[in-house]
């Protein structure tokens, strides 16, 4: 089994351990793809990878010899024939780095990225690729992998603690969960399965857990984690070296942007955090009828890649405000992880809407969901929480668990008034379906924590590494064609 791991940013500190586990426990041949020369050298020194493929090095050779007009012509042909599914401009605008470049540089880089992946997959003979889709480079790679019949597995944490699913496309669903859900609807749950789901639901409502990103982000920007700050300071020389060595050819993470940008962003965040909290946000929600829309983290894979045409949240909020019944309020709550990041003008635009209340990120989202008549969201855990509280949920984007029967899907904002009317007046909870849905997610996820080691140091621990390697091997094995050998079917 030959696996390619896409390693970027902080992942260089624990991907070699996953590679070692896959090699020694499961006999896999593991290669790595990375976005910077420094990371490539670091991975090569570990001797845990068969090969290390460096996109930045490839682009540094490609860009000087590429012709802009030829690149444009080639990319136009790919777009017009639908070769890459989603349009290339859709991918570029979802990329937090290259979308800021000039037209000429973007064109050459995108053409170079396409050629890099095409050559790699043509020659590599990989059985699977494991990596995120948080940049245009990864998105193009995932589409080309499919063209070569190579499964591209996207690790994605479900709204369950220390669990893991794999998507097989940028906008896909959790296929194993969907199959288990359909099976549960057809055959029913056993007494043990139903009790497990019921216990989970009761514990959720009693403990009101927060997503793992929230504990670090609900604090003030001035409440500094000294340990994390020290690690960030120690990595400044590495960022400077990457910027000087690869420059704008490092397009997989912020390591390729000027190192001083992150310092400036942090200073702005401190200032905004002080200025915005008291005068901009409401610290409690007014009484009366309401619907709830949470602001999403941005830039982020969940919205910019999975729902790229919903990325203008201001426009979406205005559309919702126009669609809710008269007399209702729309409660818009800032995401705790975005505290201090958005421009103040962003919030002022929301406050201009007479039937919208901008709520502080400190407000308890569980209480807000329970007191709302409907939940609206693009993607994210709010939909999951709304489902568990048996509230009508309207989703604008492709939820990973969008197969649940009681969800309302809005693909056209013009349809929202009628959808909201149906959700508020016609929604009927179904406890039996809810328990089957919960069981499907519990029964189909893998054990393991997938996160940045800077934010979650536990990701590098031996037990978690073993769990992740087991999850990857299990998922790749399930995607490979099987051939009967005697009475046993094994991956070919």
Image: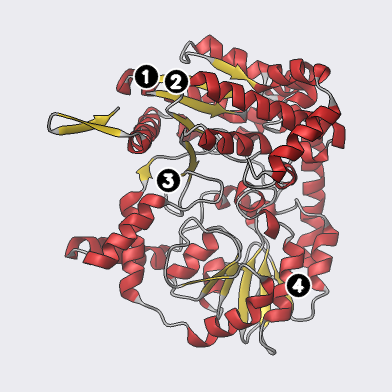
- First in sequence: mark 4 or mark 3? 3
**Which numbered tag is attached to residue 361?**
none
| Residue, disc 1 | 23
- First in sequence: mark 1 or mark 2? 1
Q: Secondary structure at mark 1?
A: helix
Q: Quadrant of residue 65?
A: top right
Q: Secondary structure at mark 3?
A: strand
Of the pair 91 and 330, the residue shown nearer to us: 91
- First in sequence: mark 2 or mark 3? 2
Residue 31 placement, left or right of 411: left
Identify the residue shown where x is 70% and y is 16%: 57
- Image: 478 above or below 408: above
Q: Quadrant of residue 441?
A: bottom left
Q: Are marks 4 and 3 in contact (CB under 8 Å)?
A: no
C-alpha span from label 2 to label 3: 20 Å
- Image: 443 above or below 189: above
- First in sequence: mark 4 or mark 2? 2
Foreground: disc 4 or disc 2:
2
- First in sequence: mark 1 or mark 3? 1
> Local crowd at mark 4 within 10 Å, few (<14), some, or many (≥20)?
some
Q: Position of residue 407 (x, y in %)?
A: 48, 70
C-alpha span from label 4 to label 3: 34 Å
Is any part of residue 150 visible from this angle? Answer: yes
Q: Are marks 1 and 2 in contact (CB under 8 Å)?
A: yes
| Residue, disc 2 | 30
| Residue, disc 4 | 318
Is any part of residue 199 visible from this angle? Answer: no
Identify the residue shown where x is 48% and y is 10%: 47
> Local crowd at mark 3 within 10 Å, few (<14), some, or many (≥20)?
many
Q: Position of residue 14 (x, y in %)?
A: 50, 26
C-alpha span from label 1 to label 3: 22 Å
């Amino acid at each position: 089994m030959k696996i390619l791991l896409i390693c970027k940013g902080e992942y260089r500190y624990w991907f070699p351990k996953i590679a070692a586990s896959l090699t020694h426990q499961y006999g896999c041949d593991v290669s790595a793809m990375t976005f910077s020369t420094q990371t490539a050298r670091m991975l090569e020194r570990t001797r845990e990878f068969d090969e290390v493929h460096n996109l930045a090095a490839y682009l540094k050779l490609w860009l000087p010899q590429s012709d802009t007009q030829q690149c444009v012509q080639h990319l136009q042909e790919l777009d017009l024939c639908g070769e890459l599914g989603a349009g290339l401009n859709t991918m570029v605008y979802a990329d937090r780095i290259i979308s800021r470049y000039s037209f000429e540089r973007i064109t050459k880089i995108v053409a170079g990225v396409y050629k890099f992946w095409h050559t790699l997959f043509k020659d590599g003979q990989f059985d699977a690729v494991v990596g995120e889709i948080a940049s245009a480079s990864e998105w193009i790679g995932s589409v080309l992998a499919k063209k070569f019949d190579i499964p591209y597995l996207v690790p994605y944490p479900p709204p369950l603690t220390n669990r893991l699913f794999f998507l097989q496309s940028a906008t896909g669903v959790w296929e194993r969960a969907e199959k288990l859900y359909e099976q549960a609807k057809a055959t029913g749950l056993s007494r043990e399965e139903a009790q497990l789901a019921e216990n989970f639901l009761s514990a959720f409502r009693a403990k009101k857990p927060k997503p793992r990103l929230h504990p670090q982000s609900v604090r003030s920007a001035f409440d500094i984690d000294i340990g994390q700050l020290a690690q960030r300071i120690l990595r400044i020389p590495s960022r400077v070296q990457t910027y000087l060595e690869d420059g704008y050819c490092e397009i997989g993470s912020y390591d390729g942007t000027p190192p001083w940008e992150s310092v400036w962003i942090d200073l702005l965040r401190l200032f905004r955090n002080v200025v915005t909290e008291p005068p901009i946000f409401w610290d409690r929600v007014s009484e009366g009828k309401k619907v709830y829309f949470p602001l999403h983290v941005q830039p982020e894979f969940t919205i910019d890649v999975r729902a790229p045409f919903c990325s203008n949240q201001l426009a979406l909020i205005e559309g919702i405000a126009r669609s809710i019944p008269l007399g209702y309020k729309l409660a818009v709550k800032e995401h705790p992880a975005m505290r201090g990041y958005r421009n103040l003008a962003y919030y002022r635009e929301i406050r201009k809407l007479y039937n919208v209340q901008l709520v502080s990120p400190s407000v308890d989202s569980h209480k807000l969901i329970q007191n709302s008549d409907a939940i609206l969201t693009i993607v994210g855990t709010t939909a999951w929480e709304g489902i568990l509280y048996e509230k009508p949920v309207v989703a604008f984007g492709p939820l990973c668990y969008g197969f649940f029967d009681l969800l309302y899907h809005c693909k056209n904002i013009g349809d929202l008034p009628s959808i909201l009317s149906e959700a508020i007046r016609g929604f009927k909870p179904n406890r039996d379906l809810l328990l089957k849905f919960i069981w499907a997610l519990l029964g189909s996820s893998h054990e393991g924590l997938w996160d940045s080691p800077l934010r979650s140091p536990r990701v590098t621990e031996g037990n978690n590494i073993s769990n992740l390697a087991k999850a990857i091997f299990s998922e790749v094995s399930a995607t490979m064609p099987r051939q009967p050998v005697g009475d046993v079917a094994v991956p070919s």
